[in-house]
Amino acid sequence: MENKSSSNFLKNIINEDLKVGKADHIITRFPPEPNGYLHIGHAKSIILNFGLADEFKGKTHLRFDDTNPAKEDTEYVESIKEDVLWLGYEWDDLFFASDYFEEMYNRAVLLIKKGKAYACDLTAEEIRKMRGSLTEVGQKSPYRDRSVEENLTLFERMRQGEFKDGQKVLRAKIDMASPNINMRDPVLYRIAHATHHNTGDKWCIYPMYDFAHPLEDAIEGVTHSFCTLEFEDHRPLYDWVIRECEMETVPHQYEFARLNITNTVMSKRKLKQLVDEHVVDGWDDPRMPTISGLRRKGYTAEAIRAFAREIGVARADSVVDSKMLEHFIREDLKLKAPRTMAVLEPLKVVITNYPEDQVEMLEAENNSENPEMGTRQIPFSRVVYIEQEDFMENPPPKYHRLFLGNEVRLKNAYFIKCNNVVKDETGKVVELHCTYDPETKSGSGFTGRKVKGTIHWVDAAQAVPAEFRLYEPLILDQEEEDESSFIDHINPKSLEIVQGFVEPNIKGSKPHDKFQFFRHGYFNVDPLSSNQERLIFNRIVSLKSSFQLTK
């Protein structure tokens, strides 16, 4: 399989920077805002930043961009740390943007003294209207020409809490006619009387992201600041802040395409909406594309890293088929997950000619593709459960499973033949009466005749009751970017819960143990709801897909 990291243009940039002496060491950073849980798109960024730093024997900082106290929480901080570690990475240094609030304030004062920033009384809506458009230049604020002394006084009073939220902001003084709207006197500071998770009530003014981010990079000595493409138009402002704030270290920003996946919400704000409106059961709901949701569903860090390496790093936005991610979890589990039998919608089968008090143990491979996983013993007796869908009273042509008069093999066991059915008062078949042929035991070398169908089963006497949660995509199509229709595209059948049975050897399973259930797919023991008294399995992925990687 081709490793697309070789076509990583960011890697080529680093190589060139080292070659020409633009950099003699590499420091990257992963800078999430702690306002929600990380999703699969963040996983790509984590793997990119940590992976490149590791490849070039550099360092990676984990930095929390915590400049918006109203939306941030220590819960999110801890979840982000857990996700990074689970993906297999350790940060060299841990920082918070709030660590630098005093430094950022001083740099803002420097801008005021240089005549490069001013206190503005316009409302957010007035600023937006006066900013202009791509075809119209912006209008200057009536407060733009305040004196340096007045701006210094007002900014200090903003810090002391003399003004209400929204009453004043600090703006950069750049160019209201700039073709780049981001350069038309952007807001640097706003007032927010809110308790901060890290600094408490020490501050009531907070820097905007476009001001804080470049300063953080410069303070930490970051050499390569990787952002997604939506920040490309912000790069001139990034460079302006570094230059005008007279930072000693000059980092550089580079942009790459964000990850978009079919049938998947890739917006933290929208994911939060799903949680807040109880569309899902939380950030770690297995239907969510969050790292914690994927982990709970049963995805492995190895599979996610392999997926990120395969999609590579590009300059142009594109959409990745969600089946590609599923492909990598299948590839990761096919040699790791023991194969066993589970019946999700059971139908009782009585083998009428099998001795009533007899129980025999049958041997079966744990994984036919990985003999090193050994074998297990399966109990077999007079009554077993099979899948309801493995019997039809009036089968169509080429139906090779069980029907009246037909013979099939029970996997790892015997041939059985259906002779009679029992129905309830509604006419539904609730029990089958079959006979078995003792000469046809699996592994016996029997060659007398062949059957076309093999079905799985569990022994009724020793089967362990279990709950199975079957997941489908949360979004019905790719139109989730349409703000007006986002919730309208939620799949009402994204979760189906069924009750059934598993083999008794699974009884002691622990959270996150993974199995391949014949015909049903790969399943994970739910880490939150499952226990020894009530086993609950999340389906990670079905067994087969039509998806093919391009070689």
Image (cartoon, rainbow, N blue to C red):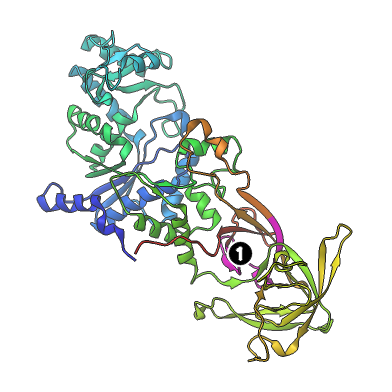
Residue 21 picture location, percent across and down = 11, 49
Please state if 60 lies on the left or on the right of 417 as rendered.
Answer: left
Q: In this view, does 501 lie to the left or right of 259?
A: right
544 versus 59 height, above or below: below
Determine if residue 327 is in view.
yes
Residue placed at 65% from the left, 91% from the top? 447
Q: Does the magenta stretch include residue 420?
A: no
- The image shows a total of numbered marks equal to 1
Q: Nearer the viewer, residue 428 or 177?
A: 428
- Evaluate whether residue 92 shows in this view: no
Q: Give the range drawn in magenta.
A: 498-522
Question: On screen, 192 above or below 364?
Answer: above
Residue type beneath disc 1: His
Q: What element carries label 1?
A: loop
In the orientation shown, which residue stands out farthest toward the left?
A: 20
Q: Residue furthest front?
A: 397
Quarter of the rendering containing residue 301: bottom left
Q: In this view of the protein, which residue sits in the foreground, 373 or 323?
A: 323
Number of residues whose C-alpha sits closer than 10 Å to that of mark 1, classed few (under 14), some (14–19) or many (20 or more):
some
Residue 110 percent across, percent down from the top left:
21, 22
Query: Where does residue 104 sit, x and y in percent of width and height?
Result: 28, 28
**Residue on which disc 1 sits:** 520
Horizontal relation, residue 234 to residue 540: left or right: left
Residue at 70%, 68% (x, y): give it.
390
